Amino acid sequence: MSYVDDSASHPDYDSPDYRSTSLRHPNNKLHLLPQRLTEITGPLFGAERVRPGDDDLTQWDGGEAIGQRIIVHGRVVDSDGRAVPDTLLEIWQANASGRYRHANDQWAGPLDPHFAGLGRCATDRDGNYRFTTIQPGAYPWKNHRNAWRPAHIHFSVFGRAFPQRLVTQMYFPGDPLFFQDPIYNSVPEHARERMISSYDHNATQDHWALGFRFDIVLRGRAQTPFESEPDDD
Amino acid sequence: MTELPATTPSQTVGPFLSIALPWQDGPDLIAAGITISGVLTDGAGAPVPDGLIELWQADPDGRYAHPDDPRGAATFAGFRSFGRCATDARGAFRFHTLKPGRVDDEQAPHIDVTVFARGLLKHLVTRLYFPDEPEANAADPVQRSLDEDERERLIARADGPGLRFDIRLQGDGETPFFTV
């Protein structure tokens, strides 16, 4: 058993338009690490790492965050189409004004005393997850002149084996800032839209919150669908 | 045949990963054990203060608490096979763990080490090996696929009672990285 090569989905380490890659990408070619026992296993973190309320970012320090309340939900599957059950998702994001609660964030957007910007949840047995949060704002950075990051939410996902580990960013549909963002555009063009959530009116709750759907696909096992084992769940 | 979904692209953790990713118990695979410390540096030799290191390793019996270990999932009292530590302002990280046992007859004891950072659009993977295993290291199939200079950079150094494993992202002494 091994996990499929999905390198065509991912950015190059050396992406000159994103200046921070210049001193942080390896110069040498990566070696092949065959998938042996250490690589076909992996940490199995799930609901035991989540406390009640961790999936709701809108309530913090005794009050309610300012901004457009949104529901972000979706399904974690592998590229064989199998659900990835009970896996830990960790998210972090800027607040409604585009400001992170971090000492090094110098952007003048105001901090929100009731928004910390981090959340956790685990997928259910069918791979579904759901967060309630605030629509993050765009914010400027120093990569190039008049550079602005499109609004995004950072996602960290474990999956069920070492090759499934993924850190990505979820974007919002129709963002006018994509064209000038070197992080979004570091991904091969054919794969970029997989990082964009879709507006989901079925998830929108009347007089409460707008819904967005973001499905996450992790590496599947290298075998033809005809040889697929039944779902573990 | 229905069309199968394509994988979600990787993106950088960015500069503010410490909002969410460090765990209080992250660096401790066990409460008291050997120390593995190191510094993450960039191509100019400067420390990387906005990085995150993760470890994945077998327990001292060479087993994993995972159903795909063909010998069956096993647990070792008080031990977790995963560790996570953010780098500090000096680029330093520090774990407490136990030396992994051999997982098979071919490979030397090893730890898979994953690196995340601002400026890394996808995480990097390397391997840590142990300096007190010269025979097993010499026979290890992964080490044998590298040249001598690269092999040496995968072997942690004795550092007092613990081990030291520095990670250089680029340039002189660049750590060998792997695609998995």
Image (spheres, coloured by chain):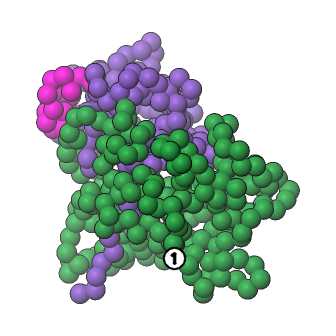
Chain colours: A green, B purple
Residue A141, image quadrant: top right
**Which amino acid type is shown beneath numbered disc 1?**
Ser
Place of residue A16 in the rendered image (x, y in percent of width and height, measured from the top left): 34, 43
Residue at figure coordinates x 62%, y 82% from the top left? A203
**Outermost residue, right direction?**
A62
Where in the figure is residue B122, as x and y percent of width and height? Answer: 37, 48
Q: Is residue B59 above or below residue A219?
A: above
State how many labels appear.
1
Quarter of the image with the N terminus of chain A is bottom left
Q: Which residue is mark 1?
A: A198
Q: Is residue B102 visible?
A: no
Q: From what the image shows, is residue B134 above or below residue B178?
A: above
Horizontal arrangement in the rendering, residue A9 relative to residue A109 (left or right) = left
Residue B167 in percent (x, y) is at: 37, 28
Q: Is residue A80 left or right of residue A107?
A: left
In the image, the segment drawn in magenta is B135-153
Where residue A9 sits in the image (x, y, percent)? 31, 61
The quadrant of the rendering that contains the C terminus of chain A is: bottom left
Dominant secondary structure, magenta: helix
In depth, the one of A52 and B38 nearer the eye is B38
